[in-house]
Image (spheres, helix red, strand yellow):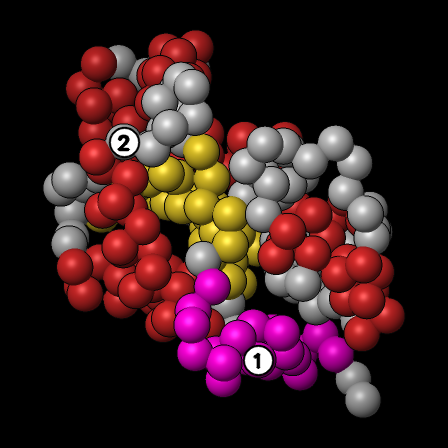
Amino acid sequence: MAFPLANPPSRLSPKLLTRATTAPLASPSPNYDPRIKEFPPNALRRKIDRLWRGGFSLGVDLGLSRTGVALSKGFSVRPLTVLELRGQKLELRLLEIAEDEEADEFIIGVPRSSDGRETTQSNKVHSVAGRLAVRAAERGWRVYLQDEHGTSTDATHRMINLGLNKTARQRRIDAYAAMMVLERYFSLSGEAAELVLPKDSDLQERLRRGPPRDIDFFSE
């Protein structure tokens, strides 16, 4: 079931993009990635300009056999689906979902230990995120990594509080974990996100330009 859109999608104006790439960030986290000033995530854009309402986000929780997906449209964050796909089929399906939901960024949870160190699973996430970032950049979409430590536990507690039974929790845990990744990303205003930047300079330029303007919402 799709939620109604409170505001139509929009893109940053050149003036606002300048603000996004030059405005200083207060108290950056230890994992702060300085490149987000040049390629600002949607949560940071919203912090800079509270009136900005464009840019939908997909949260992704990558597992060994199941991948949870969550969606943020405006201030609404919700679990979306669980995919039982791997490799190229998974990456293409994620791109299809982003297209259908008018998202322009992926927030992918990366496993880290309680002290912030990456785990053996982290390398697999980096590999998938790197391939997805190349495909996404062709469309002007961005990919970021967000520490997902503890999000599965948070997801379980959220589902219990919502009254979901054990069977429902097992079926939906991955999508709720992806939702927790998105909520953490927004709670930190995107300042703890790590940009996955393709090496190709042409793709980097596409990211700077962003997705094509939607003629349904913009006039010349």
Q: Residue at x 35, y 22 (%)?
A: 113
Task: Say which residue appears at 79% left-offset and 71% top-offset.
Answer: 13
The magenta segment is 197-218
Q: Is residue 166 left or right of residue 197?
A: left
Tell me, yes or no, whether the two marked residues, 1 and 2, touch with CB atoms within 8 Å. Answer: no
Residue that appears at 83% across and 53% down: 23
Instruction: State the image coordinates of residue 20 (x, y, percent, origin top left).
Output: 77, 58
Q: Is residue 120 visible?
A: yes
| Numbered marks: total | 2
Q: Amino acid at mark 1?
A: Glu
Which residue is label 2 attached to?
119
Q: Residue at x 16, y 59 (%)?
A: 87
User: Few, some or many C-alpha atoms within 10 Å of disc 2 (few <14, some 14-19, many ≥20)?
Assistant: few
In the foreground, 20 or 12: 20
> Callout 2, which amino acid?
Thr
Q: Is residue 121 magenta?
A: no
Residue 68 in percent (x, y) is at 30, 40
Q: CA distance from mark 1 to mark 2?
A: 32 Å
The verdict on residue 210 being magenta is: yes
Q: Earlier in the sequence, mark 1 or mark 2?
A: 2
Is 6 situated left or right of 166 in this image? Answer: right
Q: Where is mark 1, residue-wise? A: 205
Determine the secondary structure under disc 1: helix
Q: Which quadrant is home to the C terminus? A: bottom right
